Image (cartoon, rainbow, N blue to C red):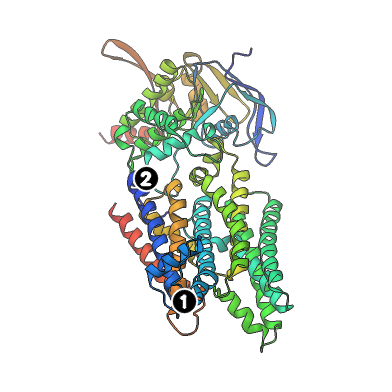
Amino acid sequence: MRWQGGEPLSLARSRLVIALLAVALVIVALASLGLGRYEIPPLKVLRILASGLGLPDPSLIEVERNVVFNVRLPRILVAIFAGAGLALCGAALQGVFRNPLVGPHIIGVSSGAAFGGTLAILFGASRSMLLLGAFAFGMLSLLMVYALHALVARRNMLALVLAGVIVGGFFGALVSLVQYLADTEEKLPRIVFWLLGSFATADYEKLALILGPILVGGILLLLLRWRINILSLGEDDAQALGISVAGTRWLILALISLIVSAQVAVSGVIGWVGLVVPHLARMMVGPDHRQLLPASALAGALYMLLIDDVARTATDSEIPLGILTALLGAPIFALVFFRSQRAGQNG
Amino acid sequence: MADEMILIRDAGHSYDGTRWQYRGLNLNVMPGEIVAILGPNGRGKSTLLRSIVGLNRPNQGTIRTNGLVGFVPQDFSAAFPYSVLDIVLMGRARHVGAFRSPGRRDSEIARGCLDALGLTQFSDRSFDSLSGGERQLVLIARALATEAPILLLDEPASALDLRNQDLVLGFIHQLGRAQGLTILFTTHQPNHALAAADRALLMNDGEHYQIGDLSEVLTESNLAALYHLPVSQVRYDHEDVELTTFAPTFRSQVERARSRRNTA
């Protein structure tokens, strides 16, 4: 699969875009702190944040501080980390698989994590068990992909994708089985809502769970970003250039599984972000993963934050994220696709 | 004994254990030597190069190299439209740690390699937008950026027009002479060997080889046996030098000439 468009761009322009994305993320995050049923003007948000840093401000009331610090701040941070993590994973996977049509779902990890979470809900386990179950089954599905892949003689990319599809399909079926078994009054709705993805229950405990894996996985992926360029040349070429292809690839897949499992554990399955955002980022900074990965992380955080703002403010009840990301992601992806194919024909 | 850059001892490779790509092969390549590998399609030329680079392991015998090996594939398509400079920079992979990105020195080396092959004006262009000849030169520049003393090229001039063949063969010869690189390249054209190589290796049928100086190995009878068609050696004068070339005799051409004569 060849992807047209995203021609090489000047380094200065890419760096400017990355800086602008970072600034935009800060502005949107501050604005999001004020958004919601209890609206707080932006300047007041800043004063509330300053008070949290130890600058006492007697004019602030406790409700406002509470809304900002205990309701919105953890939710916004979880959304930022989840979005950044998913987009980073998507960009890295598209590079490693040399295929712009793959997203984090391709290695079966989100299905595995989804099964772990639904299983915990089925058994009425505690919330920390749900987080742990989702995380553990996400990582287990990567091990299964690895084992399946190790069994075949020709260990190439296609075998890896097939192993991911098999494991993903298997866990997908198990998720359906759990839904079928769950009692329709109480547990099935919980499972369905959890699977559709939401940051509504985000708090500092969830932030703590997602923070470690996404920081560790994200920073290591960012450090490996030039290696992803080389892996994207293809197996033989990368090996001839002196890279340990299998080792680097599995390290990247393990880091991605770490991030995706943590994300699914705290916020359910959120599709499309990992697929669409890297394309938007590629249009902005070009194909070089040295710029593409940081740009994807920032754009993913921004995208997720904006979608979550819509999810929690558009209607009186929350709209599940999975629905919004797909509703928005599909047309954006179509737009990017048509644009890039046209650019390819002209160029 | 320790001077050889490439040492191949009784080496053989087979994908399935029954049909050998090459077998019982012995070859020593000295520093600065350029060796052309000729043989029909599917007789293990590329497999041999891949064994030397380390992309496959010989099932028998040994292949040793004295230093890093730079590899120029026949052609490849990048999955993403990287710039020419980015492609050449990737030649630095061995010199850059796994968790690092290339630094200023790596960029300077990559630019120097582009410059050496006259590609500087392409450095910001997308690799995919180049012609086949230009891409081949970029891949050579990338192999140079590895700073490997051994360079292997898989059919570097096969898909190119005559002018670009001239350009690529000229660079191969120059890299061997001026920079002292040890070079192996595969080709279907005995004339390419005459243009750039010191020695030739003819791979006949997976187990029969001829290795030696060009004048020794590239003979009418050897080439006719290699390709199963008559090959004539033609001597001609060009300016102040006498040159040799090999002309294949295609059967259809003979038939057409005969029928023209008979109708006349």
- In the drawing, does residue B262 fall left or right of residue A77? left
Disc 2: which residue:
B128
Instruction: Please say whether residue B135 is visible from this viewpoint.
Output: yes
Is A321 placed above or below A295 here? Answer: below
- Residue at horizontal 50 percent and vertical 80 percent from the top: A318
Task: Say which residue label 1 marks.
Answer: A311
How far apart are labels 1 and 2 at the CA level?
A: 42 Å
- Alpha-carbon neighbours of circle 2 within 10 Å: few (<14), some, or many (≥20)? some
Residue that protrudes farthest toward the front in the picture: A58
Side of A41 where A300 appears, left or right: right
Q: Name the residue located 65 percent from the left edge and 83 percent from the top edge.
A: A188
Quadrant position of residue A37: bottom left
Q: Amino acid at mark 2?
A: Asp
Q: In terms of image quadrants, where is residue A166?
A: bottom right
Left or right of A177, for residue A102: left
- The x, y position of residue B160, in whole percent, is 36, 35
Amino acid at dot 1: Ala
Q: Position of residue A118 (x, y in %)?
A: 67, 74
Camera-side residue: B154 or B105?
B105
Judge by depth and name the residue closer to the eye, B196 or A194: A194
Q: Chain of mark 1?
A: A
